[in-house]
Amino acid sequence: MAIRDILVHLDAAPAAAARLELAAALARRHGARLTGLVVIDIMLPPIATPDGGGAALGPLLDAMRRDALVEAEGIRTRFEATTSRIGVAGEWRIAEGLSAELVARHGRTADLVMLGQPDPEAGAPNATAVFEGALFSSGRPVLVVPHAGRFAEVGRRPLIAWNGRREAARAVHDALPLLAGAERAIVLTVGAEGDEDPSAEILDHLGRHDLPASAAHETAGDLDVADTLLNYAAESGADLLVMGAYGHSRLREFVLGGATRSILRQMTLPVLMAH
């Protein structure tokens, strides 16, 4: 299936400009419509007032909403200027409510959902919730763009993290339209020395999709899986990492750590994830 609809979640963070540029470039490359979505999600800190806070919060909420709408207009101006300059069909959307729910809902009618990497310094505490909402509730692949750096294009030199599990298979399948016309792909497995190589069948499958691919195996050693993947991506010149997300439960990943959370924290290139 070709990519015909791309949804990009936008905000006022500086990194959103690079995310928009990449989204527009992908839309032009695939002949897709680009939808820009801003969500007005008013989050209030706990406030102690003599009357319990009910009446006093009204003016504050109104002021916060007005500021958010003004901010959204600035983002809309940048979105329309970018789509016009690059020459892609664009649709602007603004929604009010919980970001995680609304990004997932709007993403269900897109072929690809593009989000920014959660950045604790950007003042967006719900960014991880937005990512998980899109991943688990949209039913679509999620392309996460790092908050540092600019990326002219993705999918020409993909690195595919492969362990033979369901999540990895889902990610590879969902990435295929994005990888059309790739120069070459590397299927990387990470495991202990002497582990069975599970890549032969997926290489055959990719070949039937006219995707030139080769296999590689890395032993994590003192590094965890995420570090191994990111190091290999840098050394091989990859422009996209394709991987399954949350192979373990989210609770286990939260308590023990896991490749998904580590990649989200440390990513240095765009990452397409699916579950």
Image (cartoon, rainbow, N blue to C red):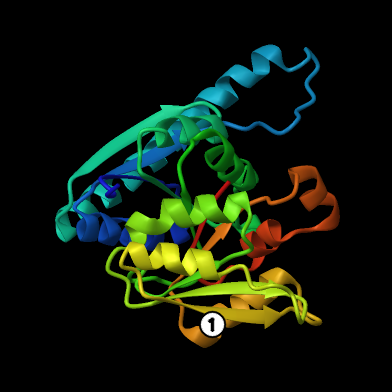
Which of 61/203 is in front?
203
In this rendering, would 93 be left or right of 161? left
Position in image of residue 273 (x %, y %) = 53, 54
**Res. 67 in view:** no
Against 209, residue 217 (above or below) is: below
Give the residue type at disc 1. Answer: Ala
Q: Quadrant of residue 26?
A: bottom left
Residue at horizontal 51%, vertical 23%?
A: 62
Which of 100/95 is in front?
100
Residue at horizontal 33%, vertical 34%?
A: 93
**Res. 133 in view:** yes
Q: Local crowd at mark 1 within 10 Å, few (<14), some, or many (≥20)? A: few
Q: Quadrant of residue 204?
A: bottom left
Residue of label 1: 234
| Outermost residue toward the right in this view | 255
In this rendering, would 86 be left or right of 166? left
